[in-house]
Image: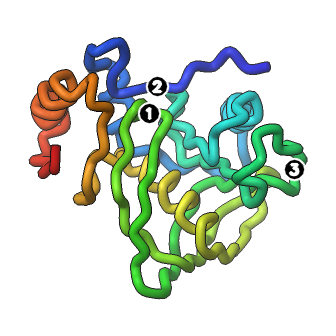
Amino acid sequence: MSDVRVLTLWKDEKINEEEALLLRRLCEDIRVPFDEERKKEIRTLVDAFLSMDEAAGLAAPQIGISKKIIIFRNKGFNEKGWSKDESDYELLINPRITQARGEMVTMTEGCLSCPEIQVEVSRYPEIKIRAFDVSGRKINKRYTDYVARVAQHEIDHLEGKLIIDCEGTLYIPKQKQEFFERTFGKIKAVNGNGISRNI
């Protein structure tokens, strides 16, 4: 069981400014072959992800590692106690989307780093990714539908982009509306981006 904590933009109605800066940082590529420190970071991400039953995916910056590493389920999204077998998830190092196809599809997404909210996000239904696997071998993968959506979401994290940066409708808990209205004004200041919101 991993005791690594997921970084969040806010908690207990307060902005986590230090964590926000880490989540907004552009991640670095990892050199291949991987040195011991990089192997440890990769293992930390895998362990953290496997300790979570509810997560569809996780990116290294979400646990404070500013490297281009993502991990996500490739099946079993509706299963609470999924097997966590290596064949049930993808681990990609230095992933790059090389091709995106199809008409963008809009769906509501949540994020571990943006707790309690959901945002409508438009994504491609089919993508191809070039990356390295855990052994440092070059791989090319094709993902479709929900798996493509999850992969794109995790790759956004590597560029410091979060679901609150997307233009879609934002859904917030009614009992916390005042907090989120204040918060998004402060996040604009930390982020430097003008974020248009439907609150």
As measured in the structure, the alpha-carbon distance from the residue carrying label 1 to the one carrying label 2 is 6 Å
Which circle's residue, 1 or 2, is located before the other in the chain? 2
* Residue positioned 87% across, 56% down in the render: 87
Q: Residues within 10 Å of mark 3 (few under 14, many from 20)?
A: few
Which of the two marks, 3 or 1, is nearer to us in this view? 1
| Amino acid type assigned to the residue bearing label 1 in the image | Ser
> Label 3: which residue?
86
Find residue 48 and report its horizontal and vertical position in percent.
Answer: 69, 29
Find residue 142 and report its horizontal and vertical position in percent.
Answer: 67, 77
Find residue 50 and report its horizontal and vertical position in percent.
Answer: 76, 35
Whether residue 40 can be seen here? no
Quadrant containing the N terminus in the rendered view? top right
Which circle's residue, 3 or 2, is located before the other in the chain? 2
| Amino acid type assigned to the residue bearing label 2 in the image | Leu
**Are the residues flagged by discs 1 and 2 in contact, CB closer than 8 Å?**
yes
Q: What's the mark number on residue 105?
A: none
* Residue positioned 27% across, 14% down in the render: 14
Taking the image as shown, residue 98 lies to the left or right of residue 183, namely right
> Label 1: which residue?
113
